[in-house]
Amino acid sequence: MPKRILQGTVTSDKNEQTVTVLVERRFTHPMMKKTVRSSKKYRAHDPENTFKVGDAVRIEECAPVSKSKRWRVVTEASA
């Protein structure tokens, strides 16, 4: 089964080897036919502490690294 890859923005880099990534998705509401924005935060593993707040990044599913980390940062997203 392929691993999911999501694109988002780093909102926090205060923890060692961890970044918090905000992933936003847009979809059309089934009844009102209006575009709805929904967002979710993921904690991702960043072993070299290379990414800072505001960076656009891609994250990939991985085996659990800690209690809350199930994702790792793959690359910086192209704009």
Image: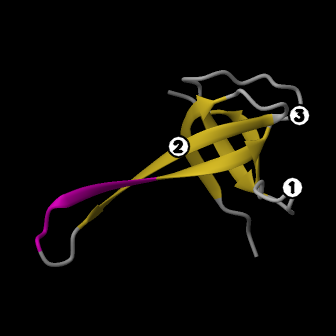
In the image, is 54 to the left or to the right of 61? left
The image position of residue 75, as x and y in percent, is: 72, 35
Residue located 82% across and 25% down the image: 49
Q: How far apart are the alpha carbons under marks 2 and 1?
A: 19 Å
For numbered disc 1, what is the local secondary structure? Answer: loop
Magenta-colored span: 32-39
Q: In the image, is residue 13 above or below residue 63?
A: above
Picture quadrant of residue 32: bottom left
The image position of residue 18, as x and y in percent, is: 78, 37
| Mark 2 lies on residue | 22
In the image, is 29 to the left or to the right of 1? left
Crowd rating for badge 3 (residues with CA inside 10 Å; few <14, some 14–19, many 20+): few
Q: How far apart are the alpha carbons under marks 3 and 1?
A: 13 Å
Residue located 54% across and 41% down the image: 8
| Mark 3 lies on residue | 47
| Mark 1 lies on residue | 66
